[in-house]
Amino acid sequence: MTAEQRVLVTRPAGQADSLMCSLRNAGFTPLHMPMLTIEAIDPLPGVQRQRVLDLDRYEHVIFVSANAARLGMACLGDYWPQLPQGQIYWAVGESTALCLEAEGLQVTRPASDMSSEGLLAMPGLADLRSQQVLIVKGEGGRKFLEQQLRERGAKVDSLECYRRSFAEHDAKACRDVIAMPELALILISSGEGLERLSGLLQPREHTNLARTTLLVPSPRVAQQASQLGWERVEQAENASDAAMLAAATTWRKTHLGETQH
């Protein structure tokens, strides 16, 4: 093992174990420093609770993340021991789909572009005139998906079942970890996580990190990283464990050469 294969994983607590294990098995030395915390919204506000009760009037239900699938299904289960029939369930990504399938749902998801853009490219969402769509998501976040669905004729509501917040860290201790000379690769799973990471760095530390490579899950986050001043940005196919591991392995072959494990 070489020190240069040390990588930092920034997923929320409780959501990094499988990726950490995969990285370790591939010969990396993973470290974990979550940038975000995920908290269920409980109880739901009245408007949100009514959308759960009205689940049977939506033709389409879209889950935008694994957190939305896990916490959203818990919300639905509180009011619908048996889900209504006739809805089409959609997942933005593979991990989201797996969560829903584990609950017994038949799910449609993009084959490769696991993003809002990839979901919108699917034929089943092309014409939504007079149809009602429920988006299960976290508090706040992007409005892109909602706006695009409305432009296609849908009536769109959101079920916000969790909130994201910046993880608490001692800023100096965090910067010491991030600025280790042997840390060459940082895995970013979302734009919010990247925002938190960048916010922890003072200007001179951010400049010194020009040598450190960010591995991000989408073109949107790659663009955000460039705008925040990161110079070395690599893009994975999506945010799944398999895609992040594949991109990290490709990066290692390209920049460090093949190693023996």
Image (spheres, helix red, strand yellow):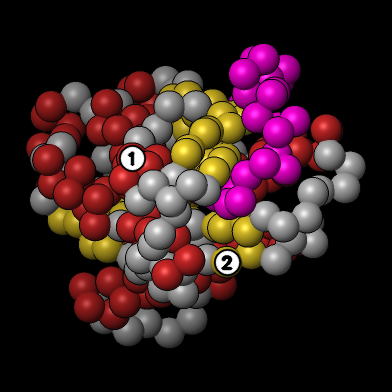
Q: Secondary structure at mark 1?
A: helix
- Tell me what residue is drawn at x 24 percent, y 57 percent: 219
Which residues make up the magenta segment? Answer: 39-64
- The x and y percentages for residue 49 are 70, 23
C-alpha distance separating marks 2 and 1: 20 Å
Q: Which residue is mark 1?
A: 147
- The x and y percentages for residue 5 are 36, 64
Q: Does any portion of residue 16 appear in the rendered image?
A: no
- Tell me what residue is drawn at x 87 percent, y 47 percent: 82
Given the current orientation, which residue lies at the most extreme top position? 46
Q: Secondary structure at mark 2?
A: strand
Q: Which residue is mark 2?
A: 108
> Which is nearer the eye, 27 or 37?
37
Residue 95 magenta-drawn?
no
> Which is nearer the eye, 194 or 59?
59
Badge 2 crowding class, 10 Å Cα cut-off, few under 14, some 14 to 19, many 20 or more, is some
Q: Is residue 172 above or below residue 255?
A: above
Q: Earlier in the sequence, mark 2 or mark 1?
A: 2
Q: Amino acid at mark 1?
A: Gln
Q: Amino acid at mark 2?
A: Thr
